[in-house]
Image (spheres, helix red, strand yellow):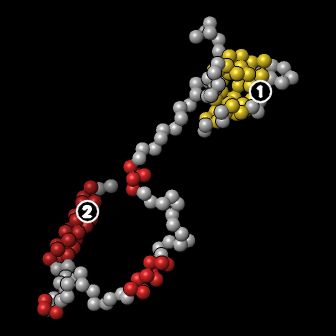
Amino acid sequence: MNVTRLRFPILLVAVLGLVVALRLAVNPLVPIALAARRDAGARTPGTESTHRVSAESATAIVSRDPFRIARRATLPAYDPLRLAELLAPPPPRPVLSLVGVVIGAVPSAVIEGLPGVEGSRVVRVGDVVAGLRVKQISNGRVVIAGMDTTWVLEVREPWKN
């Protein structure tokens, strides 16, 4: 395509855009004017109200509490001192280790590190210890769920580190 054929339309669009921008800058489409000023002597201060609310009306409004749908206090009640307290950190997750598995009619596993248990403990499928539930016991592997976590434990082999 010929370059001179493209120059003319581009130049025409640029000139028209410049003319429109200049027209809007000099004379806007909508007239701009300030509102008429009220008489300064007839004004009343903004803090003073001409309409007074009776004490009975104020009591009725406050007793109905129109801003709460259930019309009951929120639970828990607002306490600014409680907001300043630090929330207690969640309890640490236990470090569990699988010592051994016995496969038979009722599979069992020996687990160390259960919270609230000294040493190791023998567990079976379905047992719950300190909120941790034993879900599955298979060859060399145990699945435990609880505390928003699922542990998949494998038999500890000390010679492999």
In front here: 77 or 111?
A: 77
Q: Quadrant of residue 31?
A: bottom left
Name the residue: 46% across, 83% down: 60
Name the residue: 73% across, 22% down: 122
Name the residue: 60% across, 38% down: 148
Location of residue 146 with respect to 12 vertically, above or below: above
Comes first in the chain, label 2 or label 1: 2
- Residue 124: which disc? 1
Note whether residue 154 is visible.
Answer: no
In front here: 81 or 42?
A: 81
Give coordinates of residue 118: x percent, y percent.
63, 21
Q: What residue does disc 2 label?
A: 10
Mark 2, Cα crowd under 10 Å, few <14 / some 14-19 / many 20+, is few
Q: What residue type is labelled 1?
A: Arg
Location of residue 69 with respect to 120 vertically, above or below: below
Q: What residue type is labelled 2?
A: Ile
Name the residue: 39% across, 56% down: 80
Give coordinates of residue 128: x percent, y percent.
71, 33
Give coordinates of residue 41: x percent, y percent.
13, 91
Give coordinates of residue 102: x percent, y percent.
78, 18
Q: In this view, does 98 lie to the left or right of 106?
A: left
In front here: 1 or 21?
A: 21
Q: In this view, does 50 lie to the left or right of 100?
A: left
Q: Is residue 144 left or right of residue 11?
A: right
Tag 1's secondary structure? Answer: strand
Note whether residue 73 is visible.
Answer: yes
Which mark is nearer the camera, 2 or 1?
Answer: 1
Q: Outermost residue, top direction?
A: 159
Tag 2's secondary structure? Answer: helix
State the quadrant of the N terminus: bottom left
Q: How far apart are marks 2 and 1 (CA)?
A: 82 Å
